[in-house]
Image: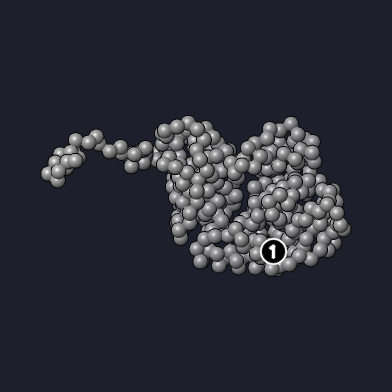
């Protein structure tokens, strides 16, 4: 064992410590382009033009609708140590910072008070577009839209004769299938399972995409030949763009006149029934997060939305559900 006098020379003889998997200094961000997710401006700054291709896939169909300060996403592409798909990130919220950390090469830091997100990903991760877009790119806009400009609602939205119906329910309740079935029947299509509430009863959604579970191919023959996509969070889905579907009447936004919670039951009487506003409030609030101020705004926004009629739709077939909704829109319950 070295003596105290020997320790300094012994330490100096050791090889230099590894500086880590990447330089502590990030690469310069020399490129910038603007995109408009859900109509909100987002400035993307990066050192790789490959990022812009992913942004176009994610948001290229959206046009600017809102004249607000742009969100900012700074995306650093670095060289990683492996080529496999990175692990799923872990999320932590330390007011007002949301972090998503997969490993030393894949992480993001979002400051919801400044609407700015910094993202580090490896060039290898860009070869897994579903992973990159779902866990990182969507976060670059969604986090700030959901806390600064709007209130996220786990719901689909369709319209008929200028009246909007918000289709709510837990995952698997049938929101996407019913909204797509309504769109095929001539209704306006706003979103399939994720809607942003702006103020009062105004909502916006992604009318450019539909995500359906593979079992939906039994209901819609035209999607049976489409590939099944393993979504990043593990659920397989069939994803299709609405652009080529001439029978889909896309709408970027709507005014909500009815809130309908779905109950796809195997038996019993079909119809529309009163639904508890307290239960609706609890459902809509449970996925919200943010600062005290942003949560207060969102809760107030939900209260204004809940001034509309709240109903439960019990049905067994899509045709039955569409007819019940048509009568609701035309005549009221």
Identified at 65% across, 36% down, the residue is 229
- Residue 199 in view of the camera: no
Identified at 43% across, 40% down, the residue is 105
- Residue 229 in view of the camera: yes
| Total numbered badges shown on the rendered structure | 1
Residue 127 x %, y %: 52, 32
Residue that badge 1 annotates = 280
Q: Which of the 4 quarters of the picture holds residue 24?
A: top left
Residue 109 x %, y %: 44, 50
Identified at 60% across, 66% down, the residue is 299
Under circle 1, the secondary element is helix
Pick the residue in front: 71 or 294. 294
Pick the residue in front: 31 or 317. 317
140 lies above or below 57: below
Q: Looking at the figure, which quarter contains the N terminus?
A: top left
Residue 72 x %, y %: 46, 49
Residue 314 x %, y %: 81, 57
């Amino acid at each position: 064992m070295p003596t105290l006098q020997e320790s300094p020379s012994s330490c100096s003889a050791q090889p230099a410590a590894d500086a880590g998997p990447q330089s502590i200094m990030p690469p310069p961000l020399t490129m910038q382009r603007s995109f408009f997710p859900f109509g909100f401006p987002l400035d993307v700054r990066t050192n790789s033009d490959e990022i812009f291709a992913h942004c176009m896939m994610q948001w290229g169909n959206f046009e600017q609708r809102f004249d607000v300060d742009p969100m900012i996403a700074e995306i650093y592409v670095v060289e990683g140590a492996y080529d496999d798909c990175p692990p799923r990130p872990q999320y932590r919220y330390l007011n007002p910072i949301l972090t998503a950390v997969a490993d030393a090469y894949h992480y993001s830091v979002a400051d919801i008070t400044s609407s700015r997100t910094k993202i580090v990903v490896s060039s290898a991760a860009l070869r897994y577009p579903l992973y990159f877009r779902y866990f990182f790119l969507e976060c670059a806009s969604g986090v700030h839209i959901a806390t600064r400009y709007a209130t996220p609602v786990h719901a689909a939205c369709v319209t008929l004769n200028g009246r909007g119906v918000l289709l709510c329910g837990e995952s698997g309740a049938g929101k996407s299938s019913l909204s797509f079935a309504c769109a095929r029947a001539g209704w306006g299509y706003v979103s399939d399972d994720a809607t942003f509430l702006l103020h009062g009863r105004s909502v916006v959604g992604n009318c450019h995409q539909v995500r359906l579970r593979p079992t939906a191919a039994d209901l819609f023959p035209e999607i049976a030949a489409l590939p099944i996509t393993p979504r990043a969070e593990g659920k397989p889905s069939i994803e299709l763009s609405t652009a080529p579907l001439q029978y889909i009447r896309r709408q970027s936004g709507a005014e909500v006149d009815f809130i309908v919670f779905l109950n796809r039951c195997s038996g019993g009487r079909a119809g529309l029934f009163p639904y508890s506003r307290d239960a609706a409030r609890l459902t809509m609030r449970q996925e919200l997060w943010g600062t005290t101020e942003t949560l207060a705004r969102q809760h107030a926004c939900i209260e204004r939305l809940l001034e509309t009629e709240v109903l439960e739709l019990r049905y067994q077939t899509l045709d039955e559900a569409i007819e019940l909704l048509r009568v609701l829109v035309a005549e009221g319950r």
